[in-house]
């Protein structure tokens, strides 16, 4: 088993480093100069569809939440996202103009599978975005897109998330083109950005080293807030989840603009705030949110390509011209930070306590 780690200390570390390659596999044959191809799905999938409903659990839910911004922004289609265990018992109203999408690394998560069956029974068109072919979900859904991330061993999901997010971004563009709501230039520039994702997911030595250094102090944190806006809000949720899962430290992901409606009351030097500050999306808005926290003496770790003088700690990401590329750069930083903290705490990174890779019971 050791050999399979290829010299990495943990499978999670190996899987973080693999992300750049597996997203390339994931895009292979699906990206053309001026269009996105998904030969595996019905040509008529989007016909008559006015709404997308996404169901998932855990990290896959965060990929879904991220994509809801992209489906509305790029494909101009209403999109809402629900946690599968909530969806199942709320007596949801399902209408046939809704495309039902489930996202799952394993294809076996009981709540997600059940949500999919409910949608199918209600006569909805369904699509599963999955990493495991011939899983319960791929056998149930009408359509499948495989994420091609390869086997993921670490319980804390990493490369499954990045490939899911890339598939969903491509799917938003696929729908945008099919509905004719995107200009040729815009589509080309989005495709251009997609081609840069593998680069953004490359782990830079200096970033890993910085995460390693920060972990020394951060492992003493008792409370962490991860904050961001727009797609960086689901990314903040994912950063907080990673830290909880493997470090057992209390962390919350929050929309930055919502901090003033309660959580800011917690601000003091013991509150560690990890601020996602992308250059290409709402920079001034998030900056003023972080300034408010800094003014109340919260300890700030800013992740940004732009210098931010109020930050107590700073992790610099590369300059890019698309917010989704910043998203992937920051994803890697968050994964490394939680992993380094976990390692320093002496935890079993790949098999955290109380958790299972795939939850096949309700
Ligand atoms: C478990 C895993 C998580 C995962 C979630 C959903 O809780 O520990 O890492 O995100 O299940 O799994 P799925 O296979 O449906 O994506």
Image (tube, rainbow, N blue to C red):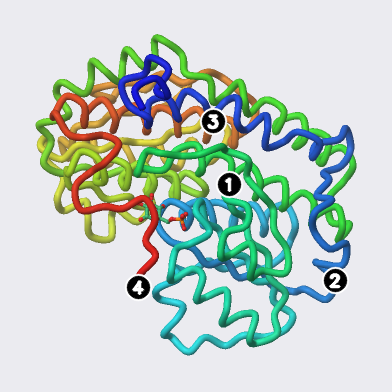
Please identify the quarter of the rendering in which residue 359 is found. bottom left
Residue carrying label 4: 362
Ligand 1 within 8 A of label 4's CB? no
Neighbour tally class for label 2: few under 14, some 14-19, many 20 plus, Cα within 10 Å? few
The reply to whether dot 3 and dot 4 touch (C-beta < 8 Å) is no
In the displayed structure, would residue 171 be above or below residue 239?
below
The quadrant in which the C terminus is found is bottom left
In the displayed structure, would residue 149 be above or below residue 314?
below
Q: From the viewer's perspective, is 270 left or right of 31?
A: left
- Mark 4 or 1: in front is 4
In the displayed structure, would residue 119 be above or below residue 343?
below
Q: How far apart are marks 2 and 1 (CA)?
A: 23 Å
The image's mark for residue 47 is: 2
Taking the spot 17% from the left edge, 47% from the top edge, the residue there is: 250
First along the sequence among labels 2 and 4: 2
Q: From the viewer's perspective, is 325 left or right of 219?
A: right
Q: Distance between the residues labelled 2 and 4?
A: 34 Å
The image's mark for residue 326 is: 3
- Mark 1 or 3: in front is 1
The image's mark for residue 164 is: 1
Q: From the viewer's perspective, is 120 left or right of 60?
A: right
Please identify the quarter of the rendering in which residue 208 is found. top left
Q: Is mark 2 on a helix, strand or loop?
A: loop
In the displayed structure, would residue 94 be above or below residue 16?
below
First along the sequence among labels 1 and 3: 1
* Location of residue 168 in the rendering, given as x and y in whole percent from the top left corner: 65, 50
Q: Is mark 3 on a helix, strand or loop?
A: helix
Taking the spot 28% from the left edge, 54% from the top edge, the residue there is: 260
The reply to whether dot 4 and dot 1 touch (C-beta < 8 Å) is no
First along the sequence among labels 4 and 1: 1
Q: Distance between the residues labelled 3 and 2?
A: 33 Å
């Amino acid at each position: 088993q050791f050999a399979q780690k290829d010299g990495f200390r943990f499978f999670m570390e190996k899987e973080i480093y693999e992300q750049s390659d597996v997203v390339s596999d994931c895009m292979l044959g699906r990206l053309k100069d001026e269009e996105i191809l998904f030969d595996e799905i019905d040509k008529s999938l989007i016909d008559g569809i006015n709404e997308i409903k996404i169901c998932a659990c855990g990290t896959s839910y965060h990929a879904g939440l991220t994509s809801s911004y992209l489906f509305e922004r790029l494909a101009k289609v209403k999109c809402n996202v629900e946690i599968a265990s909530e969806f199942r018992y709320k007596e949801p109203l399902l209408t046939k103009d809704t495309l039902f999408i489930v996202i799952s690394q394993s294809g076996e998560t009981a709540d997600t599978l059940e949500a999919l069956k409910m949608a199918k029974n209600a006569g909805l068109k369904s699509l599963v975005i999955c990493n495991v072919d011939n899983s319960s979900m791929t056998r149930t859904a009408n359509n499948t897109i495989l994420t091609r991330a390869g086997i993921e061993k670490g319980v804390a999901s990493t490369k499954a998330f990045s490939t899911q997010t890339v598939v969903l971004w491509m799917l938003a563009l696929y729908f945008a083109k099919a509905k004719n709501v995107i200009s040729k230039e815009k589509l080309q520039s989005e495709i251009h950005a997609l081609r840069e994702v593998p680069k953004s997911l490359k782990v830079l030595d200096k970033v890993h080293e910085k995460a390693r250094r920060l972990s020394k102090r951060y492992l003493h944190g008792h409370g962490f807030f991860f904050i961001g806006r727009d797609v960086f809000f689901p990314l903040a949720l994912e950063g907080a989840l990673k830290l909880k899962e493997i470090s057992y430290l209390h962390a919350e992901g929050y929309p930055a603009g919502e901090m003033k409606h309660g959580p800011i009351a917690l601000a003091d030097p013991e509150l560690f705030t990890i601020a996602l500050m992308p250059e290409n999306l709402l920079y001034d808005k998030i900056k003023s949110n972080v300034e408010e926290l800094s003014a109340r003496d919260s300890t700030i770790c800013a992740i940004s390509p732009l210098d931010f003088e109020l930050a107590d700690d700073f992790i610099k990401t590369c300059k890019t011209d698309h917010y989704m590329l910043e998203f992937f750069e920051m994803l890697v930083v968050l994964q490394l930070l939680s992993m380094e903290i976990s390692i320093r705490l002496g935890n079993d990174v790949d098999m955290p306590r109380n958790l299972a890779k795939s939850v096949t019971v309700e």
